Amino acid sequence: MTISCEQIHKQLLSQCAAFSHLSRVLTLNGPQSLERQEADKFLPYLSRAVAGQQLSVNAAKTIWGRVETQCQQHGSLHAVLVDEQYEALRTCGLSNAKVKTLLGINRALNDGTISAQIYHSDDADFITKQLVQLWGVGQWTAEMALMFFFALPDVWSAGDVALARGLNLLAEKEGVAAEKILQAATPYRTYLALHIWQMLDANLMVE
């Protein structure tokens, strides 16, 4: 049975009611939504995520815009992410490492190295193992995909610096261990993550 974002929000509020500061953040932010994307969007999603790593939002947008121009010239992203277009991708502003990763992703999706079962799976471990087997795709990238492409509701990225900072801020305010908050938010830790990122962006913890 599908559960709506409003229902999840109510459940999260109920589960976290003991934490006054977190409850305030949840209430101010309101319901958060996630939507699983279609399989044909996965190559663009993952490629753009890799291309934008460790870059400012504006720099990432500029570089991806150049890649999209290449796509228009060659017909598709699949046609661009091939060995023959290596230098063209470098001129877009992508590093050698990122080009290598992008070509590997395209190859793996084409030859079945990444199982098509990921598009129908809700198994976070299975999807993660499929993704991190690729050169240049790490745990953090896989976790972001679990959240934002596959829309799995209970993902927590312990390696995300902003999430760690936000969780520790909340835990300090509440006077509890960070793990207590994570336990309270289970099985909706992805939604907790969305609230924490929004909390940091809006400076909601500033009194």
Image: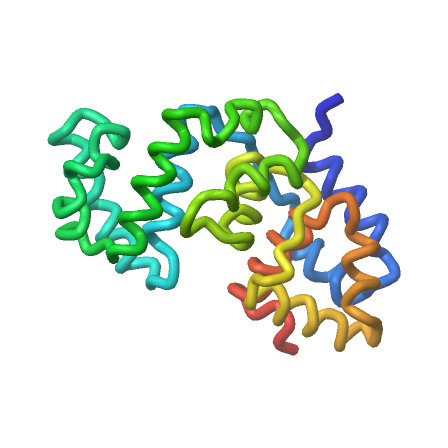
Colour style of the rendered protein structure: rainbow
x and y, in percent, of residue 31 in the image: 65, 44
Q: Which residue is drawn at 65% across and 57% down?
A: 28
Q: Which residue is drawn at 83% across and 54% down?
A: 184
* Vertical placement of residue 169 versus 63, above or below: below
In this view of the protein, which residue sits in the foreground, 129 or 10? 129
Q: Which residue is drawn at 62% across and 76% down?
A: 206
In this view of the protein, which residue sits in the foreground, 195 or 137? 137
x and y, in percent, of residue 80 in the image: 21, 34
* Vertical placement of residue 90 versus 8, above or below: below
Quadrant of the rendered structure where residue 10 is?
A: top right
In this view of the protein, which residue sits in the foreground, 25 or 166? 166
The image quadrant where one finds the C terminus is bottom right
x and y, in percent, of residue 63 in the image: 23, 52
| Extreme residue in the right direction | 18
Q: What is the tally of numbered marks visible in this picture? A: 0
For this view, does 92 lie left or right of residue 13? left
For this view, does 201 lie left or right of residue 61? right
For this view, does 165 lie left or right of residue 174? left
Quadrant of the rendered structure where residue 119 is?
A: top right
Q: Which residue is drawn at 80% across and 42% down?
A: 11
x and y, in percent, of residue 48 in the image: 35, 45
In this view of the protein, which residue sits in the foreground, 134 or 37? 134
The image quadrant where one finds the N terminus is top right
* Vertical placement of residue 91 versus 116, above or below: below
